[in-house]
Image: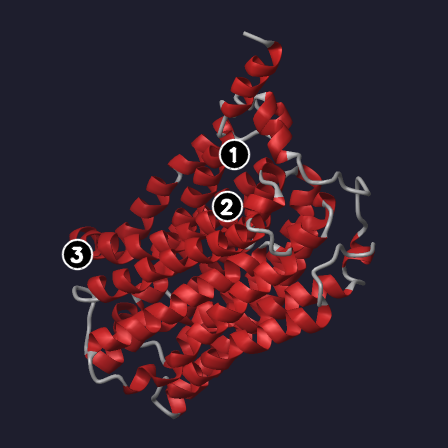
Amino acid sequence: MTSTTAQAQQTARMTSVRWTICALLFLAMVCNYIDRQMLGFLKPTLSREFGWSETTYADFVFWFQAAYAVSYLLFGRIVDRVGAKLGFAAAFVIWTIGHVGHAAARSVAGFTAVRMILGVGEGGSFPAGVKAATEWFPKSERAFATGLFNAGTNIGAIVTPLVVPPLVMGMGWRGAFVVTGIGTSIWLVLWLLLYRRPREHAGVNAAELAHIQSDPPDATPSTPWSKVVGVRETWAYALGKFLIDPIWWMYLFWLPDFFAKRYGLDLKSFGPPIVAVYVMSDVGSIAGGWASSRLIRRGWSLNAARKTVMLVCALAVTPIAFAMHADNLWLAVGIVGLATAAHQGFSANLYTLPGDVFPRSAVGSVVGVGGMVGAIGGMLMAKYAGWVLERLHTYTPIFILAAVAYILALAAVHLLSPKLAPAKL
């Protein structure tokens, strides 16, 4: 056997540890969204028990997102300094404490406090996740990998309506918070045992390492924050997040309430519609990331591939404007599911923008800025949704806003970064 043939066979046997890392990120998002969504899923039940008004619940969302916004910004910088492994582990511990703490809450102040702790921890999840994806995947695979791990958010949203009702009926809602918090902690052990940087991972062979590092090396080993916030590409990403993140928050925190008010569903009957919506979301997340990665491999420019997929997703959201007028439950589920799927496809491509145009040393910081701005948008949406539902008793104005947000987000990205060229730092 010649050395050339042996080398070719070694290349053909390239390891796939990067996909194991992607699976860990996926599982983290599952845990993240189980913990994040539970209060929204229990809103009708807890509102009756504690006498919450629409604005009281909106305030819980507001303060969660306030903490999330600050944490997202800070964790972006933290993960650039300490790395994805320690940054993600710290975030997970904090949000699990906040989640389990719901079991002890007995007042508006108590629920506000634990929601803020949850927000602090969960604010670190996406900066760390995107940082890990940037470390482990070249640009040609990064959108697909991001779409895959982001799909874990939808699995978490699917698992919640399947797991929570039996837990609540068997041990009460307080016990449900404790059990889910303890159960998801298994992930932390796996993360600490398995995560390493590619060059430090014993399971990565030379072929896979070469593939991961196939993009040109970063021009700078470190990037001051002052330079990150001073370039247009940072704000292209941040404004995109400001416009679309509040829509996803609205689905997450108010969708069970929409189905309850419009179609009379309750804790026992939420399951199938909510599961259907988030199954569609999962398909959208994976398809959106896969589509742009596929176009790049077919010779499209990164700019054209990302933005073409984002445009298709933005147009697919628009029927949500009519969801309130759907007389049939499953027609409404289809409309909402299409919108959430399109959101996830759009988001998978938007999330890759920092890794596409910034050096690896700046990715966490850029993601942090964008996440903070997106959470501020979510705070405004919480106040708006609470006001609309308290005064107008309809979701139509909220859904109309959702219908146009993605077109505006793509316009902002294109105006500020027309070619998705590397940021000039």
Q: Position of residue 421 (x, y in %)?
A: 74, 58
- The crowd level at tag 3 (other Cα within 10 Å; few <14, some 14-19, many 20+) is few
Q: Where is residue 130 in the image (x, y as percent from the top left)?
A: 58, 48
Comes first in the chain, label 2 or label 3: 2
| Residue 413 visible, this orientation | yes
Identity of the amino acid at label 1? Arg
- The crowd level at tag 1 (other Cα within 10 Å; few <14, some 14-19, many 20+) is many
- Number of the label disc, if any, that sits on residue 18: 1
Q: Distance between the residues labelled 2 and 3?
A: 37 Å
Q: Mark 3 points at which residue?
A: 169
Query: In the picture provided, is 222 more to the left or to the right than 45?
Result: right
Q: Distance between the residues labelled 1 and 3?
A: 40 Å
Q: Quadrant of the C terminus?
A: bottom right
Q: Quadrant of the N terminus?
A: top right
Comes first in the chain, label 1 or label 3: 1
Residue at image coords 48%, 69%? 312
Residue farthest bottom in this picture: 392
Residue at image coords 62%, 39%? 135
Residue farthest top in this picture: 1
Tell me the element at label 3. Answer: helix
Q: Position of residue 386 (x, y in %)?
A: 43, 81
Task: Verify CB contact (< 8 Å) between mark 2 and mark 1.
Answer: yes
Q: Mark 2 points at which residue?
A: 145
Identity of the amino acid at label 2? Ala
